[in-house]
Amino acid sequence: MSVSEPTKAAGTGGGDAPATPRRRSAWDDRKEAITNSPATPVYAALLGVFIIAWIVVTIDGGTFLTVSNIVNMLQRSVALGIVSAGQTVAILAGSLDLSVAFLISLSSLVTAEVMDGSDANIVPAVLAVLALGVVVGLGNGLIITKLRVNAFIATLGTALILQGLIQNRYDGPAGSIGEGFEQLGYTRFGIIPASVFLLVAVVALVYFLLRWTRFGFRLYAVGGDEEVSRLSGVRTHRVIIAAHVVCSVCAAITGLFLASRLGAGTPTVGTDGGYDLESIAAVVLGGTALAGGRGGVLGTIGGVFILAVLDNTFNQLEVNAFLKDVVRGVIIIAAVAVYARRSERRA
Amino acid sequence: MSATTPDAFETPVTSRSERVRKALVGTAPIFIVLFILLALIAIENPNFLEPPGFLAFLKRAAPLAILAAGQYFVIVSGEFDLSVGSIVTVVVVVAARLIDDDPSKTWPIIALLLAIGATVGVTNGLITTRLKVPSFITTLGMLLILSGAVFWWTGGAPRGALPDNFREIGRLGIQDFPVLEQLPWSVVILLVIGIGAILLMRASFGRRLMAVGDNESAARLSGVKVENMRTIAFVLSGLSAAVAGILLGGFAGVSAQVGQGLEFQAITAVVLGGVVLGGGRGTVLAAMAGALTLEALFTLLNLYGVSGALEDTVQGIIIIAAVAFASYRLRGAR
Amino acid sequence: MAPLLAMKDIRKSFLGVEVLHGVSLECEAGEIHAVMGENGAGKSTLMKVLAGVYSPDGGTIELEGEQVSFSHPVQAQGAGVAIIFQEFNLLPDRTVAENVFVNREPTKRGLVDIRSMEQHTRELLEEVGVTHFGPRTLVRHLSTAQQQIVEIVKALSLDAKLLVLDEPTAALAEHEVEVLFALLRRLRERGLGMVYISHRLREIFTICDKITVLKDGELVGTVPTEGTDTNTLISMMVGRELDGYFPPRGTAEELGDVRLRATGIETSMLTGVDIEVRAGEIVGLAGLQGSGRTELARALFGADPISAGTIEVDGKKRGRGPRAGIGSGMGFITEDRKLEGLTLAQPIRDNVLLAVRSLGRSQRKRLPNTVSVQELARSVELKARSLEQEARFLSGGNQQKVVLAKWLATQPGVLIFDEPTRGVDVGAKAGIHDLMRGLARDGVAILMISSEMPELIGLADRILVMRNGELAGELPAGAAETEIMKLAAAEDHELEAA
C-alpha cells in the first residue's frame, strides 16, 4: 500500500499542470509556496471579516477604518498575539500547552515584585521572568518526553501547580513596576504603541525560528511524524522540550507586558484573559493543525486579528459581551470544519 | 502447540471469578489510594467514620463523580469533552431563571434541562464525527457558545431563584433511613448512575464503545457504527453534566461560576482512575473512584489547613505522577 | 578491486529459529542486482541486516573492501547505503527539499540555507530528469511514483553508493515504471550499485544485470541476466518443500451452490474482475504485491467502494459498506490483524463478540439467540489462559484464531482470508489450515489470498491469479508453482516465448 494516494494537483493528469512538460520557473515555486501556505486562507478570511466589519460598522454610524481604531485593534491583539505565537510552536510540535494562563499571571507577579517600583530593577526583573519561562517550559517538556505523560495532562498538571503557587502567596495585586517600564504599555512612537513593536518583535523572532533555523525544520518534522523523524536521526525529545521552552518564554513575555499595562502584578490576569484556551483557539483559527506539523505563526497572528476585528466590531455595535463568545465559538468550530474539509479534499 | 503460552489450557474457560479478579486488578490502584486518603481523613476527623460524616463526603463528591462517569464514555471512545463545565453552568442558570422560585415548575424544567444536556451532546457528537473537527476544538467552541449564550440570555448575571423542592435534590435525602439517619438524594442518584454506567459498559454497547476507542478501523470492519457510538458517548456526557448541574444547583446555589473548571476536574478524575487518554482502556468504576479520590484529596488538604492555597499544586503533582505511573506500567506490560 | 558490497555468509536467527543460513551477496558499482525469492525466502531479513535494522548473528558485511557493521539505519546512510522501503519515510506536509534534507539542513552562519537546500534539490531533480515538480512542492501533492523519486533523490543527496529498492514497482502504473527505469539506468551510468528486490520477471530481465535467488534462507545461486531465461529462473526459485501437512482436499460431492458471485468489479485499482466461489471450496487468490489481490478482497467485503459491478451473496445482491457485507453473511480476515482485525487491549471474549454485537436486529434474526464464546474458542482450538485475557498477550496464531472466531460467531456463508497465516508460527499454521478446510466442508465458501506458494498449492481447490488489477488466469488444485509464477510474474509475450 502506498503512503498516500496520488492527487491530481501534481503529475501528469493534473488540472493546472501543463499538457507538455515544461521547465519550472522560480515563479512556479513561489506560486506553489503561496497556495501551499496554510496562512493564505486565514488572511483571505481576515480580509473578508475586515470588509464586512467595516461595512456593518459604517452603516451603524460608527467609525471603523480610521487610524486610531486600527491601532486600537492592534494594541488589543498584543497580549493574545504573544502567547499564541508561543502556543503555535508547542502545537506545531504535536503538543499543546494549557499552563500558559497561570504562567502569565505568575510572570506578571514576578515582574512587579522584582522591580518593586524602581526602574533600576528592570533588567533583573526581565531576566527573572525569562528564567521562569525557561524553567516551566523545561518542566513541561521533560514531563511529556521523559515521563511520557500526555501533553494535555502534563500541562494541565503544571497549570494546577502554578495556580497553587500563586494562590499560596497572593490574594490580590502585588508589587509595582517602575515608571520607565510602564512606558512599554503606554508610550507611542508616532501613532504606533510601543507594545505593537513588542508583538512584532516576538512574532518575527518565532517566524525566524520556524523558518530559518534547524530547530524550526525539525519541529515541523517531529510534529508531522515523530517516527519518521526519529528514523531520520532527529532527536525528537530535544525538539519537543525546546518547543515548550519557546512557548513558555512567550507566555512569560506576555506576563511582562501585562504587568506594565496594569502597573502591578495581578494573580488573575492570565486566567481572566482565558489565555490558555484562547491561544489554542487563535492558533487553530490560524490554520495550524491541532495534530501538529502543519501551519505557522503568521497564520496564528491572522487568527488573533480576526478575533480582534470581531471584538472591535461587537464593541462598536454595542453588542452584548456574551454574544461575542457565542459568535467566537461558532467561528472557531466552523473554521476548523472548513480546514478539515480542505485537507480531506487535498489529501 | 503454542510456543509462547506454555501454560495454556487446551480450551480457555470462562469464569465469573476470573472476570471479577481482572476488574479488581484494573481498579485496585485507585481504590488503594482512595482508601489511604479516606483513612487519613478519618484519623484527622473521627466523625468521618460515622455514616453522616461519610455520606456528607459522598454528597459533596457526587456531582464530580457523575461528571467523571459521563466524561469516561467520551474518553474511552477516544475523544474529549471540554463542554461539561459550561453545561453545568447553563443548567443552573436556566433553572433559576425559568423556575424562578415556583415549585410547580420544577419537574418540567428538570426534563428540559436533561434535554438541553442531550442536545449539546448530540451537537458535539455530530460536529466531531461528521464534520471531522477534533473534539478538543468542538467542545472548546461549545464551551464558549454555551457560557456566552446563557449570560447573553440572562443579561450578565444569574437571575431568579431555585425553589426548595429543586434544591432538596442536591441538599436533602430520604429522612429516617435505617442506620444512616438520612440517605442523601445525590448519593442515591450517584449509585443509580454508577450502577447504570457499569452495566452499560458491560453490555454490548459498552464493549463496542471500547472497541471504537481501542482500534477504530478494526471496529469499523467488524460492522460497528463508529460515528454513532461516539455521538452517543457525547450524549451520555451531556446528560451526566445536566444531572451534575441539577445537584450542584441545589448544593452550591445559583452562581455564574458554578461550572467553571469542572471539565478539567472531570478529565483529571477519569485519568486518575487509570483511564488512558486516546481510548480503549480503563473502567467506569475506576473513573468514578478517581473522582472520589480527587474529592477526598481536597477534603484532606482542607483538614491539613492547606486549603485553597497549595491544594492545586498538590493536585497537579499527583495528576502528573499518576499518569506517569500509568504510562510506565503500560510500557512495562508490553 | 573489491566489490562495492560484499555480504558473506550472513546468518540470522529469531527466537532460536535460523531464517538466514549463511547467505552471501555481492554487488558491483554500476550494477543493478536483482534479488528474488518467494515469501519467507529471507530477502527482507537480509536487507534489514544490511540497513542496520537487525544485527547479524554471523557473517560479515564489507563496503568497498572495508568491513562495516551498522546499528541504526542512519549509520548505514552515512556509509553510503540507502534503502528505499515500500513504506516511504517521507513527511507529507513538508516540501520536497525539506524532506530530502531532513535533519541535515545545510546552514550558513548558523541559519538554514534554504536557497542552497532548494538549489541542491533542484539540481538533483534535474539530474534525475524531473521537471514536473520542484523543491518547494509539498510531498502530499505527489503521486506514489513521484514520492519514490523523492526518496531516490534523498539517497543521492546522501552520496549513496549503494541503493536498495524493495519492490519499487509494486505501486506504480505501467508508464511510471518506464520513468523509474530510465532513472535507474542513469544512476547505473553514474556508477551506483543497486540491489533490486522484485518478483516481476519482465522487469528483472529489462533492467537487471545479475540475479541472485534465495530460497528458504539459503542462497540458490547468482547468475548473469544475459543467457538466463524465465524457465531457468523459475526452476531456481521453486521446489520448496511443501512444509508440513495439508488437510485433504474437498471432493466433488462437497461442492455446493455458488455463495459468492461478483461480476465486473471496478475500482481505481481493479478492472472488470469476475469471481465465483462455491460452498465447500477454498479458492486461492495469487498475485504479486500490487496486483490488486487485497484491493479485490476489500471491495468484495465492502471495506472500499466499487465504481462498477455487482456482488451477490447466496444469490442476493449485497448493499454497500462492511455492515451490509456482514449482514449478508460475509467475514473478512484482514492481512494486518493488529491494525484492522483486533482490539488489542480488549479481552478475547469482547473481540470474539465484536462483529455479532454490531449486527442490526434484522440481521441478527438468522442467528441463534445466544452465542457461546467458549464454544467458538473450542471450535477454533484457541489456546489461552482465559477468555478474559487481553488479545495483545496472545501469540500470532492464537490472535488469528480470535479473529476467525469473531467471524464464526456471525455464522458466515463466505469468508475472505487475506494472508491467513502471516506471522503465525509453523505449528499453528497447520491448525489454521485444518480449520479452513473444516469450514469449507461445513458449506462455507472461502476465498484465500496468499503469497505463500505451499499454502496456495497445498490448500486451495483452485487458484486464481491476478495481475495488474485483472484476473490473469485460473489453475486447478495442486498446480505447479512454475505455472503460478509465470501467470503472476511474467508478461504474456514472455509466456509464449517460454
Image (cartoon, coloured by chain):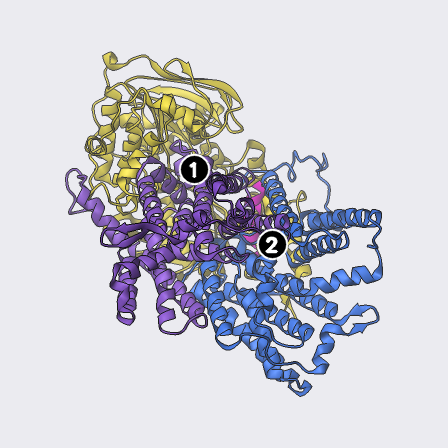
Chain colours: A blue, B purple, C yellow
In the displayed structure image, the side of residue C43 where residue C444 appears, left or right: left
Q: Nearer the viewer, residue A213 or C346?
A: C346
* Disc 1 target residue: B229
Chain that bears disc 2: A
Q: Residues within 10 Å of mark 2 (few under 14, many from 20)?
A: many
Displayed quadrant of residue A122:
bottom right
Please provide percent x and percent y for residue C80.
49, 58
Please provide percent x and percent y for residue C369.
26, 24
- Label 1: which secondary element: helix
Q: Which mark is residue A281?
A: 2
Please determine whether, in this image, residue A191 is positioned above or below residue C342: below
Please determine whether, in this image, residue C474 is positioned above or below residue B91: above
Please provide percent x and percent y for residue C156.
56, 53
Q: Nearer the viewer, residue B254 or C81?
A: B254
Chain that bears disc 1: B
Kind of residue indicated by mark 1: Met
Q: Nearer the viewer, residue A172 or C90?
A: A172
Name the magenta segment's main secondary structure: helix
Quadrant of image for the C terminus of chain A? top right
Q: Nearer the viewer, residue A89 or B174?
A: B174
The magenta stretch spans residue C157: yes
| Residue C168 seen in the current view | no
Q: Which mark is residue B176?
A: none
Q: Which residues are magenta?
A: C145-160
Displayed quadrant of residue C149:
top right
In the displayed structure image, the side of residue A287 where residue B90 appears, left or right: left
Task: Tell me how far mark 2 sits from mark 1, CA to CA.
Answer: 27 Å
Please provide percent x and percent y for residue C97.
62, 54
Kind of residue indicated by mark 2: Ala
In the displayed structure image, the side of residue B234 where residue B300 appears, left or right: left
Q: Residues within 10 Å of mark 1 (few under 14, many from 20)?
A: many
Number of numbered discs on residues: 2
